[in-house]
Image (tube, rainbow, N blue to C red):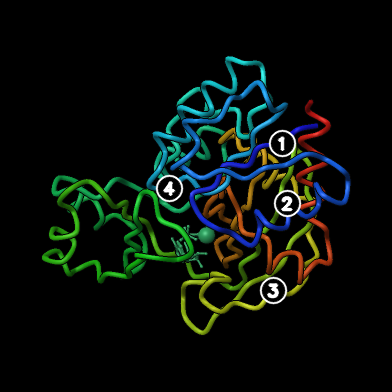
Amino acid sequence: MRLLVFSAEKQWEVKRILGECGKKKILCMAVGPKNSGKISPREFDAVLFRAIRGHAKQAISLARRAAAAGLVVVDEKLARGIDRSKLWNYALFRKAGLFVPKTILLTKKSVPKLAGFSGQKIVVKPLFGKRGEGLQLVGKGDTKKLRRLATGGKYMAQEFVPIKKEIRVMVIGGKVVGGVSKQTGNWVHNFYRGAKPVKARLTEKMKSVCLRAARAVQTEIAGIDLALTPRGMFVLEANRSPGFKAFEKGTGKNVAGIIVGYIAGRI
Ligand SMILES: Nc1ncnc2c1ncn2[C@@H]1O[C@H](COP(=O)(O)OP(=O)(O)O)[C@@H](O)[C@H]1O
Ligand SMILES: [Mg+2]
């Protein structure tokens, strides 16, 4: 197998994937958005997309060229130009019958509708956010602030769900790899915000919800955030390019190796 990894960031995870390929004598190369236009897809069998934020044009162009040349493209949906925004993913989760917090695009018109959301606070989240960046908790009555954030169509507004425990579940190629719980001192539970990974026991229900969530958004390598609340289990998001440093530490699983094995299997 000859594997190309596209990433707009120098990630620890990309290094781990290159390292696993080295161990298995698989030819593997990483490319960023600056040089991806010069790549000749025929020199590879598969291309894996990691970070593409801010460089989606270059990534999608490479994905399309690679798919046309017959390569395995992970995620395949990148070559088809399917919307990757969090809001669209929520629509797909709902369509699949999954339990998600009430969510709408934050616009001046939608602000009055937030009165119908449960609780006193509204979560305002960037449509293309990551690592817990840019999230805000805004009082439902603070319509001035909500209207200010509503310009530009960059945010979605979400019902605040009281999380008792949050679990990150990794799903690779339609299989659950495992789960770790994550908790910080505030309401945003991300590993990038200091949450420590603790291996979590997953129930059959959790596993089936996560498999359905990954399938609903056509994400082959998915980091699912599951929120356990007194109101039940919510799917918070499905990351297409999940970090796995904390996950490997918490579970002892070789995620990089599983990813490489999955792509090799697809070829
Ligand atoms: N609707 C919500 N109610 C309560 N907490 C939330 C809600 N949405 C997000 N959070 C908290 O914020 C974290 C980050 O949100 P998330 O949607 O996963 O975005 P990101 O891509 O930045 O990780 C979640 O893991 C969760 O701990
Ligand atoms: Mg998250």
The disc, 1 or 2, on the residue closer to the chain's N-terminal end is 1
Any mark on residue 17, and which? 2
Between disc 4 and disc 3, the foreground one is: 4
Q: Amino acid at mark 4?
A: Arg
Q: Which residue is mark 4?
A: 53
Find out whether the residues at labels 1 and 2 contact each other: C-beta distance under 8 Å: yes
The CA span between labels 2 and 4 is 20 Å
Callout 1 amino acid: Leu
- Disc 2, disc 4: CB below 8 Å? no
User: SS class of the residue under badge 2?
Assistant: helix
Give the side of residue 124 with respect to residue 214, left or right: left
Residue 197 is marked as 3
Say which residue label 1 marks: 3
Quick one: SS at disc 3?
loop
Say which element carries label 1.
Answer: strand
Q: Residue at x 62, y 45 (%)?
A: 30
